[in-house]
Image: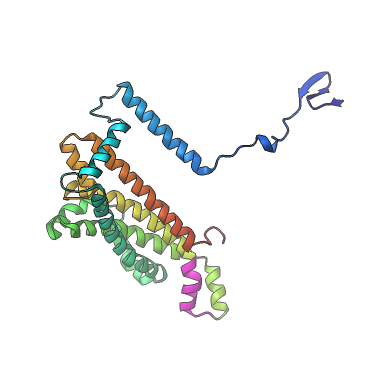
Amino acid sequence: MVVSAVGRQADGIAVAAPPGPVPARWRFRLPAPAFGAASVAGMVLAWWAIAASGAVSRELLPSPTDVWDAGAEILRDGYRGTTLWGNALSTLGRLGAGFGLAALFGVPLGLWMGVNRVASAALDWIVQFMRPLPPLSYMILLILWLGTGNSSKAALLFLTAFPIIVAASAAGVRGVKQQRIQVALAMGASPAQVFRHVVLPSAAPMVLTGLQVALAAAFSTVVSAELLAATDGLGWMVISASSFLRNDVIVLCILVLGGLGVTLAWMMRVLDRRLVHWRGRD
């Protein structure tokens, strides 16, 4: 049998040799963010092509240029007495109030329910009852009780995020391996030390995951709440622009909302990596 760089001869049949390693000078690896940028550029290009082709009416699908011009106009002149950044801050302020209160009260309550069977038996059914309810089902009652101001919207966001955070925190505690607790107790640790040094670090990944899910749910809910009753905010801009058939403003607000959502999700992932750097290492 004769083997060469091109192939080999076996039983009278020529067989191609397997390809060798690619030379280092031919290798070209793009960084991961480049793929994301390329996909965004591709979507914008497809959007521009569809709008330019006339397949969809310009009134229904404004082109990227139209949306850009609308954004420049609003940044320069405002929109119905408001500014784009002011409306974005209004939306984020409501989100921060409702989600912040939910995290402040939900995490300790969930941890308590995880370690205390009596508290879990007494409160878990309430959390499980609230969790699948559509958040906007509260909205009419909250408007009647608290008015159309920010209080009703903050309460709605609280009710949206609260059961998710409580359920995730309690599940994180219940998921702690009993062997770890038993080893800590056998080494003389007190119940408080076990909770601080064993239970809390083990439950932290689930708690942070619950916070991320709750933030996403609250963010989508605040926009829906502003569509129903608000005098500012990005959701209000969308419903107001629809009354004047300003689809370019609607698309602009959608893009801003998407950018804010991506930024908030990225911030939560960074916080997760900083606070729970041991995730996946146990």
Q: Is residue 180 above or below residue 208?
A: below
x 47%, y 63%: residue: 275
x 78%, y 24%: residue: 6
Q: Give the quadrant of residue 51.
A: top left
- Quadrant where the N terminus sits is top right
Lateral position of residue 176 relative to residue 246, left or right: right
- Quadrant where the C terminus sits is bottom right
x 27%, y 40%: residue: 72
Measuring from the top left, give residue 30's x and y in whole percent: 56, 40
Would you say residue 134 is visible in this rendering?
no
Q: Residue furthest front?
A: 76
Q: Is residue 29 above or below residue 86?
A: above
Would you say residue 265 is visible in this rendering?
yes
Residues 159 and 25: in front is 25
Q: Residue furthest right?
A: 1
Question: Magenta stretch mostly in which secondary structure?
Answer: helix
Measuring from the top left, give residue 50's x and y in whole percent: 34, 25
x 34%, y 63%: residue: 103
Residues 43 and 117: in front is 43
> In this figure, what is the number of numbered marks?
0
Lateral position of residue 257 relative to residue 141, left or right: right
Q: Give the quadrant of residue 241.
A: top left
Q: Is residue 180 magenta?
A: no
- Chosen colour scheme: rainbow
Q: Is residue 200 magenta?
A: yes
Lateral position of residue 169 relative to residue 35, left or right: left
Magenta span covers which residues? 189-201
Measuring from the top left, give residue 146's x and y in whole percent: 14, 60
Measuring from the top left, give residue 200's x and y in whole percent: 46, 69
Lateral position of residue 158 relative to residue 112, left or right: left
